[in-house]
Image (cartoon, coloured by chain):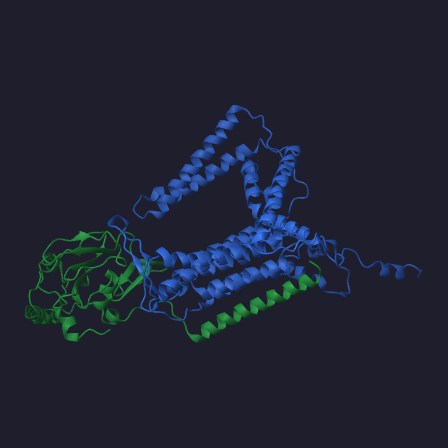
Amino acid sequence: MTSTTTSWGSRRQGSPTRPSVRQRARRLPRGLHPGAWWLWAISLAVAASRTTNPLLLAIMLAVTSLVVVARRGDAPWARAYRLYLVLGAVIIVLRVLLHVAVGFKYGDHVLLRLPEVPLPGWAAGIQVGGTVYVEGLLGAVFQGLRLATLIACIGAANALANPKRLLRALPGALHEIGVAFVVSLTVAPQLADSVHRVRRARRLRGDTVRGIRAVGRIAMPVLQDALDRSILLAAAMDSRGYGRSVQAPPRTRHTSGALVLTGLMATCIGTFGLLDAQSATVLGLPALLTGLVLAAAGMGVGGQRVRRSTYRPDPWRAPEWATATCGLAAVAAMLWVGYTDPSALTAPLQPLAVPALPLVATAGILAAGLAAIVSPVPLSTASTTPIPVSPPVTERAQERPRP
Amino acid sequence: MRIGAARSLAVSVAIAATGAGALSLAPTALAASCSDAGGVTVVVEYGAPLGTSIRCATGSPATGLDALKRAGHGYTFVPRQPGFVCSIDAKPDPCNNAPADAYWSYWHAEPGGSWSYGTAGAGSSRPIAGSIDGWSFGNGKPPSSRPPMAVATRSGAAIAGAATTGTATALGAQPPASASRNLPPDGRGGLIGLATGVAIVVLLGAMTGYLALRRQRAGD
């Protein structure tokens, strides 16, 4: 852990001894391993999915935003976080509208009396319109907030992690799936970038149309831009050997296919066995573990035929461990509170009351925020301050004439 | 809303589970029902240790849940899943730890008729005046006691109630006193917790704003 603290002190000056090469390498701005960011973000998302407590969700949103602002780079996808926040707000509004329109309304405090549309018997259970209560509406808002927080966590991972570097870290057998995955993941950031560039171009040309009429003028160039980029991406991938067919003996192909298929089926059965309390014990954890081992073996066999070299692979050092641990701390705290005091994770609606602030869960979420400190400063292409690789030239110039 | 103690006791009959013999006596048509013409009789069968409670939901309850509440029962929803009744009168407690094969099932019946499974949820069903709502904790089986018979007149109800009051007290199998009217605490916190939470959010927000401003100044 001591090495992680030095990454924060990159601006510390005037140290009497010159740091060694290794120490300097640790302080250098660099992108964190994308896997670490994804692990951190998914941990936070899992923690968010366990609660509807608005206090915890708000703290989680604040922590995520802080880490993104502190540690995002200046790549196009790094600006996408705001988009995800907007998407979250839209989700909350939609959730409330749906609750008012067709939701199940419950509670004691009447907020709004709306006429209810009578439905035939086969549509029992659906309530169109009807009186809106404070409790039900707040429940809908908190559920929307939970989904918005989850999406913000995924948005944070998108803004913080470099998707192209994530692709490199995938095992060989998953490479083709990974390519599709990365392309789909980068759609939103690429769109954000396109909109940004088209709007800037419009401003430079003096086009000041705003509002709904500007949508038509922006949409067309953005579409064209997206198409152009796809063709470029396809050409670039083609030239780098993606999509080539690999000559593998049929026996290897069949072995890896059979292993992966059997493994995945066993994994499904194992998951079902774990969730269903009445099934035999053999169908639970043993089947799940066997399935995972089989699938991993199959991927290993399949991956052997794909030979790739990686140029400058991303290291997994102490900052990566620390960041992942920060995220896992949030999940652990949330699961622990969910086990010991489940009601603290639920917004009290019956009767309405001030939500609790469980100490352990709050501490866990704040620990996730430490990722803003333990992770290295990201590489910036447009940085105004020079990267402190070597001592300033003036110092050397003063040293030379002396002897 | 406070129901008169005499009436709520009058319509509550509980069967103590002192042994297998007591349980076998359970399916008897109990002559306790609503004296109120627009009311709905609510039968709640807790299962083995607590027995059964029969009470009256006075007035004209709008939904099944409303009837449950008017009859003086407290209920909670499954955490984060409003609409699914998780516990009635704090059984099971906590409702997260309910066995996977037991839940509260919701039934309807005419006086003296037979139970039929509620096709609509308790939150959206409209109980008919004079009918009976049944709640049974178990693996989806109807309440083991038959729906109570109709009581023609108010006086009849009063007599039936007077007869059963003593029985219920003697058996001492009322639902837990603390749970019958008061809902179990459901994750409520104090103002200090709220203030701390808001302060944390504001502090983190201020830090985020400061960092964002600094980035913007740096020419991002």
Q: Is residue B88 above or below residue A252?
A: below
Q: Is residue A300 above or below residue A12?
A: above
- Residue B74 place in picture, x, y as percent: 26, 67
Residue A316 seen in the figure: no
**Who's green, chain-wise?**
B
Farthest-out residue, top? A250
Residue shown at the point (19%, 63%) measured from the top left: B50
Q: Is residue A398 left or right of residue A238?
A: right
Quarter in which the C terminus of chain A is drawn: bottom right
Question: A351 and A219: which one is in front?
Answer: A219
Residue shown at the point (61%, 50%) measured from the top left: A195
Q: Is residue A162 left or right of residue B104?
A: right
Location of residue B161 (image quadrant): bottom left
- Residue A343 place in picture, x, y as percent: 37, 64
How many numbered callouts?
Answer: 0
Residue A203 seen in the figure: yes
Location of residue A102 (image quadrant): bottom left
Q: Is residue A37 left or right of residue A200?
A: left
Quarter in which the N terminus of chain A is drawn: bottom right
Q: Is residue B113 left or right of residue A21?
A: left
> What colour denotes chain A?
blue
Residue shown at the point (62%, 60%) measured from the top left: A70
- Residue A88 place in picture, x, y as percent: 50, 56
Residue shown at the point (53%, 57%) measured from the top left: A86
Location of residue A3 (image quadrant): bottom right
- Residue A395 place in picture, x, y as percent: 85, 61
